[in-house]
Image (cartoon, grey):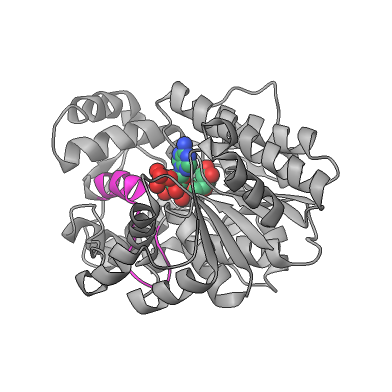
């Protein structure tokens, strides 16, 4: 039997696959968008090389992985009947991590998050009826808490249907949680809600740059239209990955939902800019009253076709989450991880920014090694 994991070609999904490979022995059923098996393996290598060398990648993929080439937005993922049956019959738990994070596109969020999650739930339903499921883990987001200001949110108080949401991403992710609860009532379910996931506390490299690029623009401004005492809940990807893998694999999770966040340990903008200044940056002036002028400037910059323009347009999208001064209590996950807290962003922000800027906000990915061309033509590795 195997764990069905969606989103393994993405940023967080690569942490989940790696954690499962290294800490556990289960096989993995991976849903990957690709034209064929080789393209799927190459796409997985692009995301997993952040964590491992090619030899380790090959070892896992030849013994423990079955790739299902499919798309969340197609009926039964677009798999032929026999493959869909094989997937359903061999899956004994699921981690649904894939999503569209495109906050600007209602269509993308609706299709990938709502239709896609419904499709994953249907698979879980069939597996539950066929042989029973050990667990359904759903990767959600703290954005389901909707519009907030100056709050500390507890897991069980986050969803409030009367509240507005900042964007279609938040709204669709909120409804995904609802579907999981309504449609899989007898399956052990765990909801994980990461806060702003940025970087890895153990090394500068990352493969996801959207938030880093927005943060880089902020860090380069001499004047910040923010309250210096405003807090921002940032959590490193290594902590989020470790928590999801650990809790998913437990016989019994202590709670039905977890914030994967920095909670009360979240830092203020002043703490972050002081840390960046110590690492060679300059100290900005805080002028929260500048809000209107600032949004005009960001708007103007966002039309520029360069890294600054892209950073500014990302800043515009993320802005509500930067000024809400809202943090998400993390005592449940800290308890599950035996008291381990996430590393503070100030301890690894500077190398993360340096790596990202030096690489122009793109991961310098290594291609599929050419000496493995024989594997390529033979279509080696497990998987249908
Ligand atoms: N990153 C954050 O700051 C953050 C914060 C809170 C919560 N989260 C949650 O964490 C999860 C993972 O986020 P991430 O940052 O890792 O995102 P990501 O890097 O954009 O990865 C998204 C993954 O979803 C897959 N996917 C998207 N559309 C698909 C489709 N139609 N069919 C099959 N797969 C599809 C992508 O596959 P392709 O490679 O084929 O595109 C990719 O593997 C999401 O559920 C997100 O809501 C993230």
Q: Is residue 66 above or below residue 110?
A: below
Indicate the position of residue 307 as horizontal and vertical percent values.
17, 42
User: Is residue 151 within the magenta segment?
Assistant: no
Does residue 17 lie above or below 372 as drawn?
above
- Residue 218 lies in the magenta stretch: yes
Horizontal arrangement in the rendering, residue 117 relative to residue 288 (left or right):
right
In the rendered view, would you say 310 is above or below 56? above
Classify residue 152 by image quadrant: top right
- Point out residue 104 in the picture as x, y percentages from the top left corner: 40, 26
Dividing the picture into quadrants, the one containing residue 311 is top left
For the question of whether residue 73 can be seen, the reply is yes
Q: Residue at x 52, y 31 (%)?
A: 74
Task: Work out whether residue 189 or residue 372 is closer to the camera in this orientation and state it.
Answer: 372
At a point 65% along the width and 56% down the height, the residue shown is 330
Q: Residue at x 66, y 52 (%)?
A: 94
The residue closer to the viewer here, 336 or 68, is 68
Image x and y of residue 164, in percent? 59, 22
- Picture coordinates of residue 1 (x, y %)? 69, 63
Span of residues in magenta: 199-219
């Amino acid at each position: 039997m195997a764990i069905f994991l969606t989103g393994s070609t993405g940023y967080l999904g690569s942490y989940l696959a790696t954690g499962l490979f290294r800490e556990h022995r289960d096989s993995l059923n991976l849903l990957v968008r690709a034209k064929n098996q080789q393209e799927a393996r190459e796409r997985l290598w692009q995301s997993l090389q952040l964590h491992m060398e090619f030899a380790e990648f090959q070892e896992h993929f030849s013994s423990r992985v079955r790739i299902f080439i499919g798309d969340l937005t197609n009926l039964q993922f677009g798999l032929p009947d026999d493959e869909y049956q094989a997937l359903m019959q061999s899956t004994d738990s699921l981690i649904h991590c894939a999503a569209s994070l495109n906050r600007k596109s209602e269509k993308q969020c609706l299709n990938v998050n709502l239709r896609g999650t419904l499709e994953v739930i249907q698979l879980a339903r069939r597996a539950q009826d066929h042989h029973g499921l050990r667990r359904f883990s759903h990767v959600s987001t703290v954005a389901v808490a909707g519009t907030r200001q100056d709050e500390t949110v507890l897991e069980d108080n986050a969803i409030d249907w009367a509240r507005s949401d900042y964007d279609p991403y938040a709204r669709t992710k909120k409804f995904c949680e609802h579907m999981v609860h309504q449609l899989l009532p007898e399956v052990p379910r765990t909801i994980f809600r990461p806060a702003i996931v940025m970087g890895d506390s153990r090394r500068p490299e990352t493969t996801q740059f959207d938030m880093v690029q927005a943060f880089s623009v902020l860090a380069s401004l001499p004047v910040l239209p923010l309250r210096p005492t405003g807090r921002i809940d940032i959590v490193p990807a290594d902590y989020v990955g470790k928590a999801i893998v650990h809790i998913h694999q437990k016989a019994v999770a202590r709670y039905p939902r977890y914030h994967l966040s920095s909670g009360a340990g979240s830092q203020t903008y002043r703490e972050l800019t002081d840390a960046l200044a110590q690492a060679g940056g300059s100290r900005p002036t805080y002028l929260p009253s500048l809000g209107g002028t600032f949004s005009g400037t960001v708007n103007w910059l966002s039309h520029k076709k360069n890294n600054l323009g892209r950073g500014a347009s990302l800043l515009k999208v993320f802005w509500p989450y930067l000024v809400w001064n809202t943090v998400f209590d993390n005592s449940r996950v800290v308890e599950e991880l035996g008291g381990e807290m996430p590393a503070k962003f100030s301890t690894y922000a500077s190398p993360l920014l340096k790596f990202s800027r030096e690489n122009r906000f793109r991961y310098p990915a290594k291609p599929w090694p050419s000496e493995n061309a024989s594997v390529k033509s033979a279509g080696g590795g497990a998987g249908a």
